């Protein structure tokens, strides 16, 4: 978990909470709202870093395909 920044941990937790509540993954805009971000590019950057570190994956051309591969705990 040390390889994740505070914001990356918050993002991973937000994805997990959204999936638990709705039974499907959030859209980038949903995550931006949950994290209090105005820019979808900031969300995209956070998600790419989480993907590069092996925590999540998604299908780039498909909506709502975020998957958690490992948790931050």
Image (spheres, helix red, strand yellow):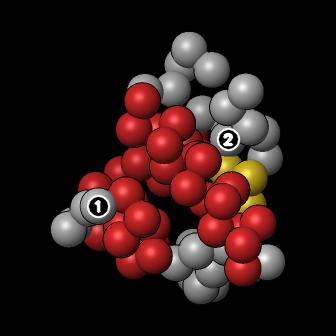
Q: Residues within 10 Å of mark 1 (few under 14, many from 20)?
A: few
Residue 71: give x, y in percent of width and height: 74, 37
Task: State the residue at coordinates (37%, 58%).
Answer: 35
Per the model, the C-alpha gap separating discs 2 and 1 is 21 Å
Q: Which disc, if any, is residue 55?
A: 2
Above or below, comparing residue 47 to residue 34 in the picture: above
Give the quadrant of the N terminus: top right
Left or right of 32 on screen, residue 73: right
Task: State the residue at coordinates (55%, 42%).
Answer: 50
State the residue in front, 19 or 64.
Answer: 19
Secondary structure under tag 1 reads loop
Q: Which disc, if any, is residue 36?
A: 1
The reply to whether the C-beta atoms of the residues labelled 2 and 1 are less than 8 Å apart is no
Secondary structure under tag 2 reads loop
Above or below, comparing residue 62 to residue 31 in the picture: below
Above or below, comparing residue 61 to residue 15 in the picture: below
Left or right of 43 on screen, residue 13: right
Residue 28: give x, y in percent of width and height: 45, 72
Q: Which image quarter: residue 43?
A: bottom left
Q: Residues within 10 Å of mark 2 (few under 14, many from 20)?
A: some
The reply to whether residue 70 is in sight is yes
């Amino acid at each position: 978990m040390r390889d994740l920044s505070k914001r990356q941990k918050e993002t991973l937790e937000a994805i997990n909470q959204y999936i638990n509540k709705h039974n499907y993954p959030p859209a980038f805009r949903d995550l931006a709202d949950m994290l209090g971000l105005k820019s979808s590019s900031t969300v995209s950057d956070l998600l790419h870093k989480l993907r590069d570190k092996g925590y999540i994956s998604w299908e780039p051309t498909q909506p709502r395909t975020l998957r958690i591969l490992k948790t931050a705990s």
